Amino acid sequence: MENFEFISPTKIIFGRSTESLVGEEVKKYSNKILFHYGGGSIKRIGLYEKVVGSLKEAGVKFIELPGVKPNPRLSLVQEGIKLCRKNKIDFILAVGGGSVIDSAKAIGVGVPYEGNVWDFYTGKATPKETLPVGVVLTIPGAGSEASNSSVITNEEGWYKRSLNNDIIRPKFAIMNPEVTFSVSSYYTACGAADMMAHVMERYFTNTRNTDLTDRLCEATLKTIIKNVQIVLREPSNYDARAELMWASTIAHNGLLGTGRVGDWASHLIEHELSGLYDVTHGAGLAVIFPAWMKYVYKHRTDKFVQFATRVWNVELDFENPEKTALEGIEQLRDFFKKIGLPTTLKELNIPEEKFEELALKCTNGGTTTIGNFVKLSKEDVIEILRIAKE
Amino acid sequence: MENFEFISPTKIIFGRSTESLVGEEVKKYSNKILFHYGGGSIKRIGLYEKVVGSLKEAGVKFIELPGVKPNPRLSLVQEGIKLCRKNKIDFILAVGGGSVIDSAKAIGVGVPYEGNVWDFYTGKATPKETLPVGVVLTIPGAGSEASNSSVITNEEGWYKRSLNNDIIRPKFAIMNPEVTFSVSSYYTACGAADMMAHVMERYFTNTRNTDLTDRLCEATLKTIIKNVQIVLREPSNYDARAELMWASTIAHNGLLGTGRVGDWASHLIEHELSGLYDVTHGAGLAVIFPAWMKYVYKHRTDKFVQFATRVWNVELDFENPEKTALEGIEQLRDFFKKIGLPTTLKELNIPEEKFEELALKCTNGGTTTIGNFVKLSKEDVIEILRIAKE
């Protein structure tokens, strides 16, 4: 186990009707806030009205900034920063999924910073302070409700980049599984793939002796695998929705990565797909992750054998453990297919001519490597994209 | 799953040599602190000097209050409160195991409170504020380093009572597994039993649909079971000590109980043993827990079958699942024996004549019940003590 520091101070308020508590929670921080959200979906499901009602009841004034898109854009973040400064706003409420929360986090660190907020995403600067952010979660998957990360897309060049810093962890996250009943099958499946990727990026590690976190990872994966299938059959099954929602937080609040070095190459490769082709993140991961696995599994067959036997109940082939490792990867790919996700770049309409460009982008023009489990060069990334081709 | 609120904001600083960071961490809160510890063990292992060195280097002044005993006493807490008030101290550093931390938490809530701090332990009052508490952990087990609870023994009547409140969660916990190399086999085993009890008190619940937390509980139990055996053979095995240490925090920071109602009857019965006979908490739990299980398992055989198959790898007897449930309980009892713990009241020299008194004490003179999984009357407690007899 590696030395580590871990802090996850987000207050979780979980369960039926909990959105009615939002005004009371917000009021602990501010009387005048930015209410940040996406499109019409929170109005369609009646959540908008409930949140507005609760804020008004608590005497909290708000300025609205809707319009967050999946793969949230830097331009809207800049608009939010200006709006907060102009109106002397000191708290941001994000009502939505990972995109809205990530956008709110970006506005939060941008407001007190004199330079361009994009500096935090390129690594040019490190945020020292932030406006506090609160969350009412509507789509589980990204785990942003309690995570220390935010991912933003810069339309100039379509770069999708992330900021990771403990100061951007939200103050509270209100999570009512009922709110997620209307999430479509496709977005539910994408969310599950994103959660699973968050776990697996931590699971496949070079760190030895990781008993507890290995088992916590496996526990979380098995829960997601079981419950997403129930939800796809019964979209209004409260308990299955609840399991998925809580799993999404646990998958990405950092606990499962304590004491071990994660990989994150699959996430980085996927970010380039999302950046260039506006692919839904979870769908991109469903394509990239099994391909990455096939490319790297020989680096630590033992870990892939463990994944196959413990997560997928593959019977261990004692004579040929490599077969078992490969069977685990196939199980994962089959599972993604089963829940309605693409598993090839062809399905995403990404042609082979683009592989070079994608690989260049995520390796800084071929000058750096990505990943920790195996360090991948531009050429390695191209090979992985080829495996994912069809 | 039940609605829940969960917050666990303690900053964990985990790994080799991390005690050298204590001065720097403390300084974020205060320049003048109470340094609270037990007896000579932290001096014997050289930890005292390291902590003092780090505090001095950071320019932090401290007043020492040693003398915390296992099953920490109210009288020392009162002394600590007076000491803090007299010296205008606003931070408490606990260097030790659960007893020291629990004592520090009690002092923390006692200082700003005008009444008797024991009020918080009898439920007569609820703490509204506390001095911040930081921890350097030396014995894993109690989980107090990140928990919201403190257990104190009042020498007047030898009542052992607990306070549970989120405001008493420590600000930080420094956890270096190397510091635990010198913990004796017996105390290591007691710590493991305490951790396991913290998990099992949450595991056996009437709440239905608890997939994720069930699996997280099982993951934590399996980690403890595996690693305590390694540690008993190899006391200086860093990785196994690290697994136990991190598992102790996870077992009791509240995560594993999210969305489910815990039981806690075994803990309450054991507290009476510890209060009257000064039994080591983990040893008392090793005696009480299997007896409690035998008394209540028919209430939800399914949960005990799950425990047996998933935690102990007992093969499911499809024709007679009850046999499987009972086998799981035997496995637990055998395991406690194997790691050197008592499993009968006889071994603890607690005679049958005392059962009535013990049962009366933990049921408020027979007027209340304890537990949630099954609500236990005074008579039920006596029956459980009889099962635990020999």
Image (tube, coloured by chain):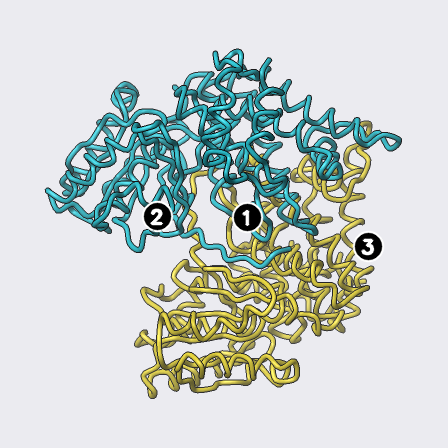
Chain colours: A yellow, B cyan
| Looking at the image, residue B79 lies above or below residue B131 | above
Q: Who's the residue at 51% across and 77% down the image?
A: A154
Please tell me the numbered disc located at residue A334: 3
Amino acid type, mark 2: Lys
Of circles 3 and 2, which is in front? 2
Asked where in the image residue B183 lies, by quadrant, the reply is: top left
Q: Could you classify mark 1 by the number of other residues whose Cα lies within 10 Å: few (under 14), some (14-19), or many (20 or more)?
A: many
Q: Could you classify mark 3 by the number of other residues whose Cα lies within 10 Å: few (under 14), some (14-19), or many (20 or more)?
A: some
Residue at label 2? Answer: B124
Name the chain letter of the residue that bears numbered label 2: B
| Looking at the image, residue B380 lies above or below residue A168 | above
Cα separation, mark 3 vs mark 2, equals 58 Å
| Looking at the image, residue B385 lies above or below residue B365 | above
Screen quadrant of the N terminus of chain B: bottom right
Q: Who's the residue at 42% across and 56% down the image?
A: A9
Amino acid type, mark 3: Asp
Dots 3 and 2: beta carbons under 8 Å?
A: no
| Element on which disc 3 rests | helix
Viewer-nearest residue: B142 or A100? B142
Please tell me the numbered disc located at residue B170: none
Residue at label 1? Answer: A262
Dots 1 and 3: beta carbons under 8 Å?
A: no
Q: Earlier in the sequence, mark 1 or mark 3?
A: 1
Cα separation, mark 2 vs mark 1, equals 48 Å
Asked where in the image residue B45 lies, by quadrant, the reply is: top left
Residue B173 on image: x %, y %: 36, 41
Residue B72 on image: x %, y %: 32, 29
Name the chain letter of the residue that bears numbered label 3: A
Screen quadrant of the C terminus of chain B: top right
Viewer-nearest residue: B76 or A7? B76
Amino acid type, mark 1: Gly
